[in-house]
Amino acid sequence: MASGRGITSRRGRRKINKAFELQLTSMMDVLVIIVVFLLKSYNISTHNFSNAAGLQLPASGSQDNPTDSLQVIVTPESLTVENERILDFQQVALSAGSKEANYSFKPTDLDEGGRRILPLYDALIKAKERTELLLAKSKSRGPDGKPLPFEGILAIQADKRVKYDTIKKIMYSAGAAGYRVFRFLALKKDV
């Protein structure tokens, strides 16, 4: 029985009659860890894509963020490259109940059998030359010591009323100008 009294007497001695105090250093550690976690997991897209007035983009369920690239905006009224209007379409009378936009190209805007859009091709060549010049002057170099290559990425914002044939001509013109990767921008669907 003597050993039992010893354990209970030790337990009794451990009780401290001080008031309970909150350990602020532990709480601060927890808060710092939470703040660091939130900062690391917070995602912001630094790409600034402008929108034309009246542009109706299609909806998409994709969660991918667009990469930084040259921007082309296609509306039923015009074609814009990097916020510079380069082409106005000829408007045709609307038919009743039509969901597609009624417009056409001027004959002087097309070449190569009506497949290439000249103003778009010229604007894309200028943008490509400007980008290649900036890459040549940049201090960033590839593993071989040469300037980084031109990537040829084009972001296309096309109104959902724009005809497929127009998109095909835009892609053909861009391909002829050296742009090989196309990113179609859409509105993110709320899931």
Image: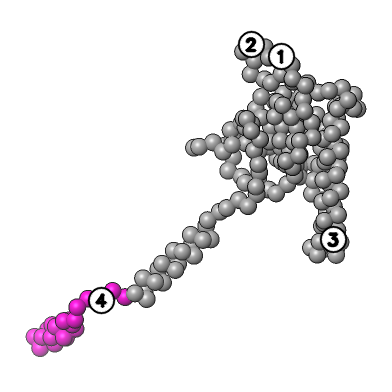
Q: Earlier in the sequence, mark 2 or mark 4?
A: 4
Instruction: Quote the CA–CA distance across marks 1 and 3.
Output: 50 Å
| Mark 1 residue crowding within 10 angstroms, few (<14) / some (14–19) / many (20+) | few
Residue lying furthest left in this view?
1
Q: Are marks 1 and 3 in contact (CB under 8 Å)?
A: no
Q: Earlier in the sequence, mark 1 or mark 3?
A: 1
Residue range in magenta is 1-23
- On residue 93, the disc is 1
The structure residue drawn at horizontal position 77% and vertical position 25%, both measured from the top left corner, is 89
Quick one: label 2 or label 3, which is nearer the N terminus? 2
Left or right position of 184 against 107: left
Picture coordinates of residue 166, whole percent (x, y) = 76, 26
Q: Is residue 103 magenta?
A: no
In the image, 98 versus 16, the foreground residue is 98
Badge 2, how many Cα within 10 Å: few under 14, some, many 20+? few
Amino acid type indicated by mark 3: Lys
Residue pointed to by mark 4: 21
150 on left or right of 99? right
Q: Find disc 2 in the rendering and name its residue.
A: 96
Give the Cα distance between marks 2 and 1.
10 Å
Q: Position of residue 52 (x, y in %)?
A: 66, 35
The label shown at residue 164 is none
In the picture, the disc for residue 137 is 3
Q: Estimate how packed mark 3 is, as few (under 14), some (14 to 19) or many (20 or more) residues with alpha carbons within 10 Å.
A: few
Distance between the Cα atoms at labels 2 and 3?
A: 55 Å
Q: Residue at x 56, y 54 (%)?
A: 43
Element assignment for label 4? loop
